[in-house]
Image (cartoon, rainbow, N blue to C red):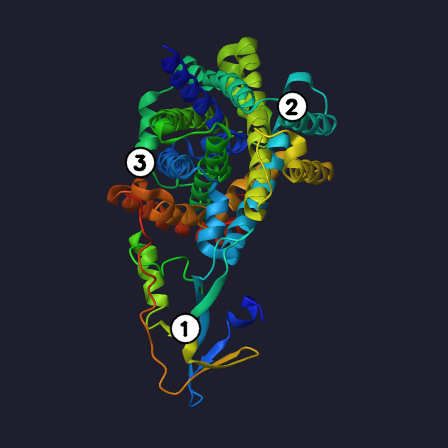
Amino acid sequence: MILSDLLGSDAFDADGRRLGAILDVRLEISGAPAQLLAETVVTGVLVSSHSRFSTWGYERRGEDGPFLIAWLQRWLHRGSFLVAWDDVELVDVGRVVFRAGYEQLDPMLPRAPREA
Amino acid sequence: MKNLFAVALGVLTAIGGFVDIGDLVTNAVVGSRFGLGLAWVVLVGVVGICIYAQMSGRVAAVSGRATFEIIRERLGPRAGLANLAASFLINLLTVTAEVGGVALALQLATSVDPGWWIPVAAFGVWIVIWRARFELLENVTGLLGLTLIVFAVALFMLSPDWGELAGQALQPGPPADEPVATYWFYAVALFGAAMTPYEVFFFSSGAIEEKWTEKDLAKSRLNVLVGFPLGGLLSIAIAGCAAVVLLPAAIDVTSLSQVVLPVAEAGGKIALSFVIVGILAATFGAALETTLSSGYTLAQYFGWSWGKFRKPAKAARFHLSMIVCLLIAVAILATGVDPILVTEYSVVFSAVALPLTYLPILIIANDREYMGDRVNGRGMNFVGQVYLVIILAAALAAIPLLIITGAGA
C-alpha cells in the first residue's frame, strides 16, 4: 500500500456510518536517519468531516497566522479528529473502517521544538 | 561609502526595473482616456507590490530557501501546482509581451518591422541569461531604464495645467463620456500591471542568487520602499504625458509611437532618443526577469537545481525550460499578434492570477518553522490581508469586466 491509497479515503465507524475523509496521516520516526529519510511508522490518521481540502499546515499548534486564512481553515476542518492506527480495523479501496469503541483524539500537532 | 553606493545602486535599479511594457502601455492608454483619473490605482498597486515584495524577500533571506520550494512543502503539491500553474502561465504571457516590447522599441529606433526584431530580441535575452552575471544584468538594465525619467521631464516641459491634472487625480471616477465598466476595467488592468507577479518571484529568487542573509534585509527593504514608489511616480508621469497631449487630441494608444509621442513633442529628438533607450532597457530588463522567473518557478516547484550562480550545465533543466519559454514566446509573436494587445491581455490576466500568487506568500511569511521570530508582525498581517481582499476583488472582477467592456473598447 502507498500513502495515496489511504489519503482521500472515506472513513467509517464500525456501524457503517460515514465519519468523513482521511485527510492526512501522522508519522513517527522509528529509526535512525537513512540515505534519504529516516524510517517512519504511521501512528494515526486525520479525519475531517466537512472537507477534503488540504489543511495547508494549519493542523500544527501555534500556526495561526494570518488570521483570515487560519479562521477559514479552522471552519473548513471544524470537528476533525485523529484516530490512532491501532483503532483502524480495515483498510479497503477508498474506505477505512475504525474499530468499535475507537477514540477521537485531538487533531492538532504539538508545537515543533524550537531552538533556543 | 561602499555601502552607500550599494544602497543607491539598489534603489536606482529598483526604479528603472519597476516599469515594464505592461506599465508603459497601460499607463499611456489610461492617461489618454481618463487623464490622471486612475492615478490612485497606481498608488494602491505600488503599496501592494512593496508589501509583498519585501515579504517574499524576507522569506528568502531568513529561510535561505526559495519561495516556491516552501510553498509546495507547506501547502502540499496540489495547492502548490495551482499556484505554479497560475503564476507560470501569466508569466509566459508576460515574457511574450516583453519580447514583443523589445521588438517594438527596436522598431521605433530603426523603422524596421518588429517581425524581424522578434527573433533577435529573444536571442539577445537568451544569450544574456546564459552568459551574464546576475548582478550585471540586473544593474545594467535597471540603470539604463532610468532614462525613462524623461517622461517626468517631458511632463514639466509640456507645462500643463497642473490644477487640471490634480483635479483629475483627486476626483476619481469615470468621466461623463466613458461607461463605468470601462473605468473599472482599466482600474483592474492598471492594478495588474503594477502588481505583476513576476516581480515577486524575481525578487525572492534574486535574494537567493545574491545570497542574502538577515543582515541584508534592511538594505533590500530600502530598495523596495524607495525604488518601487519612485517607479510608480514614473508610471504616473507616463499617464500624465498622455493626459496632457493625447487626451485633448482624442488620440488612442495602439502602438508604442503614441506612448512616446508626448515626449517627442516636449523634447524633440533628444528626448525621443532617451525614451527609446529607456523603453528598450525597461522591456529588455523585464524580458530577462520574466524569463528567469519562469525558470525559477518551474525549477523550484519540481525541485530541479537552479540559479544563475550555477554553471548552465549544473542547472540544465532550469536553462532548458527558459529556452523553451522563449521559443513559445517567439512562436506566439510569430502568428503576427500585436504585442500591444498581448500586453493588454497579460496585465488583465495577471490580475486574475494575483490571489494564487500572493496568498501562499502571506501564509509562509507567518510560518514559524521557516521564519522563526521573523514572521509577519500584526501590522504587516493586517495590511497583507487587506490587500488580499483587494486582490481577490480585482481577480474576480477582471474576466467579467473584460467581457462586458469588450476588452476596454
Say which of marks 3 and 1 sits in front: 1
Same chain for the residues under marks 3 and 1 in the image = no
Res B345 seen here? no
Q: Name which residue type carries label 2.
A: Arg
| Residue at mark 3 to residue at mark 2: CA–CA distance | 49 Å
**Quadrant of residue A45 within the rendered picture:** bottom left
Residue B248 vs B96, above or below: the answer is above
Tell me, yes or no, whether dots 3 and 2 are on the same chain.
yes
Q: Amino acid at mark 1?
A: Val
**How far apart in space, not on screen, are marks 3 and 1 (Cα)?**
54 Å
Mark sitting on residue A47: 1
Q: Is residue B129 left or right of residue B67?
A: right
Residue B131 circle label: 2
Q: Position of residue B236 (x, y in %)?
A: 41, 27
Q: Chain of mark 2?
A: B
Image mark for residue B45: none
Check contact, mark 3 vs mark 2: CB within 8 A: no
Q: Which residue is at a point 55% across and 43% down the rendered structure image?
A: B300
Question: Which chain letter goes with mark 1?
Answer: A
C-alpha gap between disc 2 and disc 1: 52 Å
- Left or right: A80 in relation to B290: left
**In the image, residue B151 lies at what x, y percent?**
46, 19
Q: Residues within 10 Å of mark 1 (few under 14, many from 20)?
A: many
Label 3 belongs to which residue?
A: B171
